[in-house]
Image (tube, coloured by chain):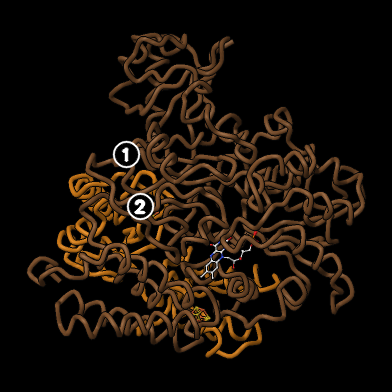
Chain colours: A orange, B brown
Amino acid sequence: MTTLNEQARNQIAKVITDLQHKPGALLPILHGIQDRLGYIPPESVPMIAEALNQSRADIHGVISFYHQFRSTAPGQHTVEICRAEACQSMGARQFETHVKHTLGVDYHGTTTDRSITLESVYCLGNCACAPSVRVNDQIIGRVTPEKFDGLVDELRSQKLEVQ
Amino acid sequence: MSVKVYIPRDTTSLALGADHLASELAAAVLERGEEIEIIRNGSRGLFWLEPMVEVETSAGRIAYGPVETKDIDTLLDAGLINGETGHPLCQGLTEEIPYLKKQQRLTFARAGITDPVSLEDYQAHDGFKGLKKALQMDSQSIVNEVKTSGLRGRGGAAFPTGIKWQTVLDAQPTDGSQKYIVCNADEGDSGTFADRMVMEADPYMLIEGMTIAGLAVGADQGYIYLRSEYPVAHQILNEAIEKAEAAGFLGVDILGSGKTFNLEVRLGAKAYICGEETALLESLEGKRGMVRAKPPLPAIVGLFGQPTIVNNVLSLAAIPYILAEGGHAYADYGQGRSLGTLPFQLAGNIKRGGLIEMAFGLTLRELLEDFGGGTYSGRPMRAVQVGGPLCAYLPESQWDTELDYEAFQAIGAGLGHGGVVVFDDTVDMSEQARFSMEFCVEESCGKCTPCRIGSTRGVEVIDRIRNNENRDANMDLLSDLCETMIDGSLCAMGGMTPFPVQSAVKHFPEDFQKDNAETGA
Ligand SMILES: Cc1cc2nc3c(=O)[nH]c(=O)nc-3n(C[C@H](O)[C@H](O)[C@H](O)COP(=O)(O)O)c2cc1C
Ligand code: SF4
Ligand code: FES
């Protein structure tokens, strides 16, 4: 396991002190950490446990219960494919096959260039204009394999610009 | 004064490019030396027309849709700014579009008309009338008004809202005074987006409804448990809460009444089971979303052990109207024990998908054909799932059923949260049955064996049936397994997952009898 750098540790500590007074603070804290770092580093578990006066096992149990929380760093962008019924009725199953093939990864996987992490989602509330995908915080409707490929090119070129 | 042009900012409009459209339109207008004021409204819910651009004229708003950026020039040439109607995308006066005109919008009366975060707009369209009345009433009178309305919970279980509120009003907090109002905004069912539309198009209505609930039972703290799959709703709700507080409609000393109600949005983390009210409460408390055994009811031992109202977004959103116009006005809509209106959501493989708020009692076929206009693909419609992933698939022979709670129960189906998902004739119902089981495997909280293990076995058995391995014996096994799940599960996740499976087997038996070559499984 890579050890966490000082800056990340400070960010975690700040999220915890900002939120620990809230009733039922754990989910807000976990969201806060994942929003900033993209994941919940295992090193944060003892820090949260101490602040909330709970056991590490408790904290770990909550992290693993929810599909959204992850303990390893994701790629630069997260792409979520809706797998639920309304999207199925508009060809989501074939679309999902296309996406996995194009990216060369399965769900929860990250592309070798680390640009994209693929996740599934059950409904994005865009069911009247299915199929739907979510790219980071943006939802896209009536998506087609061609539209998706264009999107991936765009995401990958953004990564190059950043570097 | 420049012309007002409306372009929605709800998830579906954005998902179809509304942001880009708005900026390109603004630029194109500027280039022509003209002037418009673009207002980002909520959606009217006519999703097949999104992004729908509306232009204010003296006769009312004129609609154009679905508009893409490539249409901007021809629209401007055809006089969009003056609301001229010659362009092929012009739909005429918005209010005259039959899909909208035929509806009975009580809850969605303001949707798409107002700027969702404008307090001025909200008040100009009857906003806070219910709250102002409630502030003049005692708790019992507020609860009585809700009872009179006949409102039943819109989250799926259809429990009478007034009775739930009475229980919370009468309950004694163990710590002396604390009670809570929790809004269930987890909207996990595929095919549903009415909660999202409330939050994105008219968030003050939900805030008002929750505040009235607080006054009704003596609760000063509310939480909206919002699914994290709704980033747009999250942003709009937070903006609205901040503005409502600053203007004295929320927080301490509401409108000078001395009453307090605080409201906070909490995000879920992708877990369908957290829509179940007790799992939701566990999650709000910072725990795993494990279902609690009932009793005790959340109304008596709810959030942090205190009396708690847990209501769906639509239930709470109906409250301002009920208080403003009276419970009787609401109960005038609907039939039998299904009173008021239900916002139906037409989704999936449908030509004209969208939100249709109507009194209970129209038939499913009217919804599918008159409103929906058939499938999106143009192929024959074959199966319709009403009420979300835990409810039955209906074959054409059942489409003349009236949409009300009792009529649907009578055919072994449910209305759930009002979502309607349409499939054309390319659907393989054994694949849909398999998905129901698979979804339960993914989303079960794991507390009871029939649900956790039963669904895993269900997937295996359906795979064998699809592969034509011992098919008859496995069909029997599937039937037994469904019964075990129905009888032995603690909550509706395990207890109702068999419904779509059984309906698929019963109404579409041929899909379980194909050669394996054909299923390709
Ligand atoms: C597995 C499961 C998921 C549920 N999901 C939701 C949901 O997303 N939204 C909702 O309002 N109710 C949901 N419910 C129903 C709630 O448990 C509860 O009945 C409802 O929030 C009560 O509010 P109401 O009386 O206003 O309908 C779900 C129930 C089950 C068993
Ligand atoms: S039926 Fe399933 S989801 Fe419900 S309590 Fe049992 S294991 Fe949990
Ligand atoms: S089912 Fe895919 S967005 Fe609702």
| Image spot of residue B185 (x, y percent) | 58, 58
Pointer 1 and pointer 2: residues touching (CB < 8 Å)? no
Q: What residue does disc 1 label?
A: B374
Q: Looking at the image, which residue is at 30% across and 14% down?
A: B74
**Which circle, 1 or 2, is nearer the viewer?**
2
| Residues indicated by labels 1 and 2 sit on the same polypeptide chain | yes
Pick whichever, A13 or B420, lies toward us. B420
* Residue kind at label 1, given as amino acid type: Gly
Q: In this view, does B145 lie above or below B65?
A: below
Q: Where is residue A67 in the image (x, y as percent from the top left)?
A: 42, 72
Question: What is the three-letter code of the residue carrying label 2?
Answer: Ser
Asked whether, in this view, residue B35 is left or right of residue B185, the answer is left
What chain does badge 1 belong to? B
Vertical relation: B397 (above or below) B123 = below
Nearer to us in this view, B177 or B391? B391
User: Which quarter of the image is occupied by the N terminus of chain B?
Assistant: top right
Q: In which quarter of the image is the C terminus of chain B?
A: bottom left
User: Can see residue B190?
Assistant: yes
Which quadrant of the picture is home to ligand 3?
bottom left
Chain of the residue under the numbered disc 2 shown in the image: B
Q: Which residue is drawn at 20% across and 53% down?
A: B426
- Which quarter of the picture shows residue B385? bottom left
The answer as to whether callout 2 falls within 8 Å of ligand 3 is no
Q: In this view, does B515 lie to the left or right of B401?
A: left
Q: Does residue B87 appear to the left or right of A154 in the view shown?
A: right
Is the residue indicated by label 1 positioned so its CB lies within 8 Å of ligand 3? no
Q: Nearer the viewer, residue A158 or B339?
A: B339
- Mark 2 crowdedness (10 Å alpha carbons): few <14, some 14-19, many ≥20: few
Q: Distance between the residues labelled 1 and 2?
A: 16 Å
Please give the residue where the numbered disc 2 appears in the rendered image: B397
Could you tell which of marks 1 and 2 lies nearer the N-terminus? 1
Image coords of residue A22 (percent x, y): 69, 70
